[in-house]
Amino acid sequence: MPVIDSTSTKPVIAVAFYSTYGHIDALAAEVIKGVESTGAIVKPYVIKETLPHEVLQKMYANTSLQAKYPAITPNDLKEVDGLILGAPTRYGRLPSQVDNFFDQTGQLWATGGLVGKFVTMFTSAAGQHSGHESTYTTTFPFFAHHGMAYVPIAYSNPLVGAVDAMQGSSPYGASTVAGSDGSLKPTANDLAVAEYQGKYFANFVGTFVKGKQAAPAATTTDAAKSVPETSNGYSVDKVAGEPTDKATSTSAPAQANAEKPTPAVDGTPAPAKTAENGSPAKTSTAEKKPKKKGFFSCCDDSGIDK
Ligand SMILES: Cc1cc2nc3c(=O)[nH]c(=O)nc-3n(C[C@H](O)[C@H](O)[C@H](O)COP(=O)(O)O)c2cc1C
């Protein structure tokens, strides 16, 4: 596993994939080759199997594929600039093994840990028209929730639009047609598009990484300052649909204050607060915010539950 130098302008790209029979594994090898050809740092991972051994045996799964690379953990994603995700189609969408991994990323979501990172995907399906594209599009909500920018290959390589022979790829990314019994192998075109996707993505992310490192620090700071506080998608006020009251102290008249009593945690309106002399009481936001329960309580260090 390569050691990451934080001052390097080389992008760090994770290639994380799940494969039952080897088609995705074969595409992944080409994707990795493509990333490496750009000089980027590639970190290959498998996505952990979750099916019981007896079931895998009945499916004739190739369980040795799991041992090829370390199983990815959510924390591994923190270190990378981009993710290339590979997974076969299951009922026109992702396999549950990948969903299981996604479900472990709740804390990354709550802390905005993947916001601004890049992602692209490759897939595989038994048939020609039985789920390739829907597997991409049904995964987009995950990327959107995490703030990850999807990089499609579009038709930037003529091999993507080839119709002279059966091939799996599309503007969304590389793919292959495995056949209903899994006996088909990725074609030369499929493998070439997979390698191309790795190269294209690494170059794309590399341009961003270089630009970011070349930008003067002040620019980044100013840009961050100019973002209005209310645009923070992780604000508890916004998430919970409550009125946004970001001021640390209130200067509104007592009457206005009385019209907007702070609801208690159980939903009962609390009495309006006024100082002893009748003027508006100084109320800190920390005092007014009810403690969140349920899902948000999972994320102790996120700040959203405080
Ligand atoms: C439970 C299950 C559901 C599947 N659903 C679909 C499907 O909706 N469409 C399709 O074309 N292939 C479907 N397949 C076939 C897989 O997509 C195919 O086995 C896979 O692309 C091969 O990739 P792999 O060798 O990397 O596992 C399904 C396979 C299984 C086991």
Image (cartoon, helix red, strand yellow):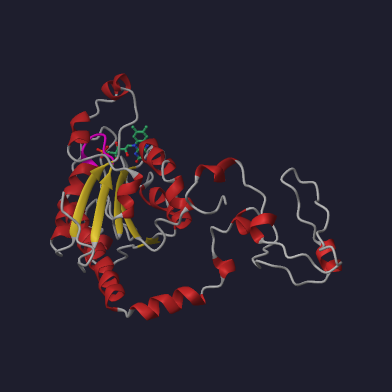
Which residue lies most toward the top here? 54
Q: Is residue 154 above or below residue 59?
A: below
Q: Residue 165 colored magenta? A: no
Ligand 1's quadrant: top left
Residue 251 place in picture, x, y as percent: 75, 72
For residue 25, side relative to residue 121 (left or right): left
Q: Residue at x 62, y 59 (%)?
A: 238
Residue 243 place in picture, x, y as percent: 70, 61
Which residue lies most toward the front here? 276
Residue 195 place in picture, x, y as percent: 18, 57
For residue 113, side relative to residue 277 (left or right): left
Q: Is residue 39 above or below residue 263?
A: below
> In the rendered image, which quarter is residue 56 located in?
top left
For residue 78, side relative to residue 246 (left or right): left
Q: Residue at x 27, y 50 (%)?
A: 175
Q: Residue 20 colored magenta? A: yes
Q: Residue at x 42, y 60 (%)?
A: 115
Q: Is residue 262 visible?
A: yes
Q: Is residue 94 visible?
A: no
* Residue range of the region highlighted in magenta in the rendering: 18-23
For residue 73, side relative to residue 263 (left or right): left
Q: Is residue 129 above or below residue 246?
A: above
Instruction: Report the predominant secondary structure element of the magenta stretch.
Output: loop
Q: Give 135 or 86, whichever is nearer the viewer.
A: 86
Residue 298 place in picture, x, y as percent: 51, 42
